[in-house]
């Protein structure tokens, strides 16, 4: 898609989140800064109905409860019925048995179009040897490009592995996104925000692999621009929102840094 940001801002897709309580405010603000409309409806009584009027669904298992899992399954089923994209951010997979089991339950019960996580979270979901410390990635033993491609094939989903370089695959194509800045790891929530951005881009582009690639390029460019004006994490956070708000497709196209393998 030539001008995804312009399309998001013109169409204002509604992005339904069932997400992490720690970062919910940041995800809502980042979705809005890109031009989409965020809604956070977690109650089982209304979540499926809310998904029914939305353009994408973002699920984030960062602060899990059994009730939230029920809501995620209800909303994902509604999204599958409506044929809108479902993004699963597998936060902290590998850290606890409950988290591992609930992530597997979601993947086994409903269709997930885009599975996102850091290197160790995705490796764990793919059945590889990996360790997770809380929600932080540690080490993996296998090649992330191979993991992303093979897991995308086996799950019939787009797989997104985030890190210093982001790896995205639909089982055939593999993109490596090199945009971003180390300051993005200095504040809590940029990983969760990235899932919201991916949901926003997938809402307007049915090629979910391309949408995820573009989302991470745009978000990464904003991080680079913000870092150039920042003295630390506090000013970086403010500048990140401002750079996204003032961003244009033309500006990003001149700075996008990715390769296809």
Image (cartoon, helix red, strand yellow):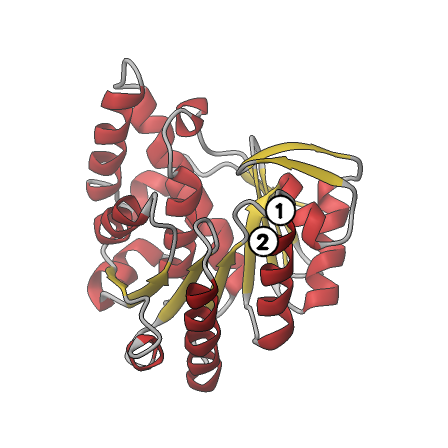
Q: Regarding mark 1 in the picture, which secondary structure is present there?
A: loop
What whole-number distance in Å separates the C-alpha atoms at marks 1 and 2?
5 Å
Decide: is 22 above or below 198: above
Instruction: Answer few, some or many: residues within 10 Å of disc 1's Cα (few below 14, many 20 plus, some between 14 and 19).
Output: few
Q: Position of residue 36 (x, y in %)?
A: 25, 59
Q: Regarding mark 2 in the picture, which secondary structure is present there?
A: helix
Q: Position of residue 160 (x, y in %)?
A: 58, 51
Q: Residue at x 42, y 36 (%)?
A: 220
**Residue 1 appears in view:** no
For the residues bearing labels 1 and 2, Cβ distance under 8 angstroms: yes
Residue 231 falls left or right of residue 183: left
> Where is residue 107, by image quadrant?
bottom right
Residue 164 falls left or right of residue 145: left
Please tell me which residue lies in front, 225 or 196: 196
Residue that label 2 marks: 99
> Where is residue 115, by image quadrant?
bottom right
Q: Residue at x 28, y 44 (%)?
A: 26
Q: Residue at x 48, y 62 (%)?
A: 87
Residue that label 1 marks: 96
> Where is residue 42, by image quadrant?
bottom left
Q: Position of residue 65 (x, y in %)?
A: 45, 59
Instruction: Answer few, some or many: residues within 10 Å of disc 2's Cα (few below 14, many 20 plus, some between 14 and 19).
Output: many
Q: Residue at x 33, y 22 (%)?
A: 227
Please tell me which residue lies in front, 155 or 165: 155
Which residue in the rendered view is the most extreme toward the top? 231
Decide: is 217 above or below 125: above
Quadrant of the frame with the N terminus = bottom left
């Amino acid at each position: 898609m030539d001008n995804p940001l312009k399309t998001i801002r013109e169409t204002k897709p509604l992005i339904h989140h069932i997400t992490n309580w720690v970062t919910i405010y940041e995800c809502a603000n980042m979705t809005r800064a890109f031009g989409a409309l965020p809604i956070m409806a977690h109650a089982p009584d209304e979540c499926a109905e809310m998904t029914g009027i939305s353009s994408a669904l973002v699920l984030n298992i960062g602060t899990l409860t059994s009730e939230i899992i029920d809501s995620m399954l209800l909303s994902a089923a509604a999204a599958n019925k409506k044929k809108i994209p479902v993004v699963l951010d597998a936060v902290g997979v590998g850290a606890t048995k409950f988290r591992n089991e609930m992530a597997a339950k979601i993947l086994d019960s409903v269709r997930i179009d885009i599975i996102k996580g850091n290197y160790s979270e995705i490796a764990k979901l793919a059945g590889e040897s990996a360790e997770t410390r809380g929600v932080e990635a540690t080490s993996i033993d296998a090649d992330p490009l191979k993991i992303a491609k093979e897991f995308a094939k086996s799950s019939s989903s787009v797989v997104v592995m985030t890190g210093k370089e982001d790896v995205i695959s639909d089982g055939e194509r593999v993109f490596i996104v090199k945009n971003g800045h180390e300051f993005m790891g200095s504040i809590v929530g940029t990983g969760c925000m990235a899932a919201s951005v991916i949901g926003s881009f997938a809402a307007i582009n049915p090629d979910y692999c391309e949408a995820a690639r573009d989302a991470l390029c745009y978000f990464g460019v904003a991080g680079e621009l913000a870092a150039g004006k920042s003295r630390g994490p506090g000013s970086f956070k403010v500048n990140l929102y401002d750079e996204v708000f003032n961003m244009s497709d033309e500006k990003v196209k001149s700075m996008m840094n990715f390769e296809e393998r």
